[in-house]
Image (tube, rainbow, N blue to C red):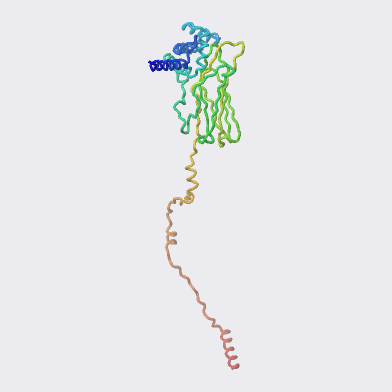
């Protein structure tokens, strides 16, 4: 009997611990299913307000959004509280928003709106190859105009897979959830190189759009290794007289790295290393027809040399001199 009581006590404690650890949704917060339905109509209402083109966009947007609250029998305060609650529970928030995006996209296609503009064109890339998505942080995040939660920032350190001359695209999609006008927001992208050179690019972020912040190094940075990249998205804080809540969703965060194109050096190397050059090759010649005289001179033949022998002198003076020489020799003897 004691064993059964002890076992029952253990089960009761385990149940108490499990139920106590499970976070409960506070009173007045919309359920995940209810929040999803409200968010779908909320996005459609914003699109309808922008398409109405009634002059004062902020007033038109407020009117359409109030109609959404009336349709779902909720107040503006309940929606704002639920938005803050799910913002602090980001995993739930993005799960809700993923379903909202699919339903809004289906509605857009139903009415003939091209929904491809909000799709991530780099979603098929991996972290390998000449063109790769090297993003290592969470692909989705959000910020609000609160002093502690109004900025998102990241750092990516270069490694051995980087090459001099690499080009980069920082990609993200923005979705503002607001009852008023969109707040001016900024994105800053910074690249630092090994020679301590720093490149900084600033982009205004307005509306619900895809943003591609691109950078391709030029000389002399195209020959220097990259050290690291930094970036942040910043939303100014709310003024004391502002009471409308705003949330900026950053979706499909990606960093696309593209290696520089390899130059085709095969042709140049083959010309430099080849010992047989074109100017050493004999040029083709057309055989010329020779004349009969040229043919005769071209044929082999022996040459004769004519030598003329001179005859000895036979004049009288010569004979006289020879006789005198004989007489002198005789007397000398």
- For the C terminus, the quadrant is bottom right
- For the N terminus, the quadrant is top left
The residue nearer to you, when weighing 119 against 317, is 119
- Rendered residue at 57%/30% (across/down): 191
Find the residue positioned furthest to the right: 240
Q: In the rendered image, which quarter is residue 184 located in?
A: top right
Residue 81, horizontal then vertical, whole percent = 52, 11
Residue 22, horizontal then vertical, whole percent = 46, 16
Q: How many marks?
A: 0
Residue 194, horizontal then vertical, whole percent = 58, 35
The residue nearer to you, when weighing 211 against 285, is 211
From the viewer's perspective, is residue 215 above or below residue 94? Answer: below
- Rendered residue at 45%/13% (across/down): 32
Find the residue positioned furthest to the front: 2
Residue 182, horizontal then vertical, whole percent = 55, 15
Left or right of 165 in this view: 301: left
Left or right of 116 in this view: 242: right
From the viewer's perspective, is residue 275 above or below residue 304? Answer: above
The residue nearer to you, when weighing 2 against 33, is 2
Q: In the rendered image, which quarter is residue 215 located in?
A: top right
């Amino acid at each position: 009997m004691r064993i059964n009581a002890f076992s029952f006590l253990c089960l009761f404690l385990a149940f108490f611990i499990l139920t106590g650890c499970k976070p409960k949704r506070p009173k007045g917060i919309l359920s995940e299913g209810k929040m999803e339905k409200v968010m779908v109509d909320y996005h459609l209402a914003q699109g309808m307000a922008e398409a109405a083109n009634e002059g004062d966009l902020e007033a038109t947007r407020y009117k359409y959004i109030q109609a959404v609250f009336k349709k779902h029998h909720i107040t503006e305060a309940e929606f704002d509280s639920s938005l803050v609650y799910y913002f602090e529970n980001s995993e739930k928030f993005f799960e809700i928003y993923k379903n909202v995006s699919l339903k809004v996209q289906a509605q857009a296609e139903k009415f003939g709106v091209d929904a491809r503009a909000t799709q991530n064109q780099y979603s098929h890339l991996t972290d390998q190859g000449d063109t790769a998505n090297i993003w290592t942080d969470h692909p989705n995040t959000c910020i609000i105009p609160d002093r502690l939660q109004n900025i998102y920032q990241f750092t990516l350190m270069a490694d051995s897979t980087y090459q001099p001359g690499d080009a980069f695209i920082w990609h993200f999609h923005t979705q503002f959830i607001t009852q008023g006008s969109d707040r001016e927001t900024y994105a800053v992208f910074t690249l630092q190189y090994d020679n301590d050179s720093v490149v900084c690019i600033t982009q205004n972020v307005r509306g619900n759009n895809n943003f591609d912040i691109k950078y391709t190094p030029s000389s002399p940075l195209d020959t220097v290794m990259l050290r690291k990249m930094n970036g942040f998205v910043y939303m100014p804080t709310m003024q004391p007289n502002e009471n409308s809540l705003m949330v900026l969703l950053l979706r499909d965060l990606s960093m696309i790295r593209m290696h520089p194109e390899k130059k085709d050096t095969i042709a140049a190397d083959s010309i430099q290393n080849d010992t047989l050059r074109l100017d050493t090759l004999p040029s083709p010649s057309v055989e010329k027809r020779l004349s009969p005289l040229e043919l005769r001179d071209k044929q082999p033949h022996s040459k004769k040399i004519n030598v003329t022998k001179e005859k000895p002198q036979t004049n009288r003076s010569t004979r006289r001199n020879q006789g005198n020489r004989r007489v002198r020799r005789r007397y000398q003897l």
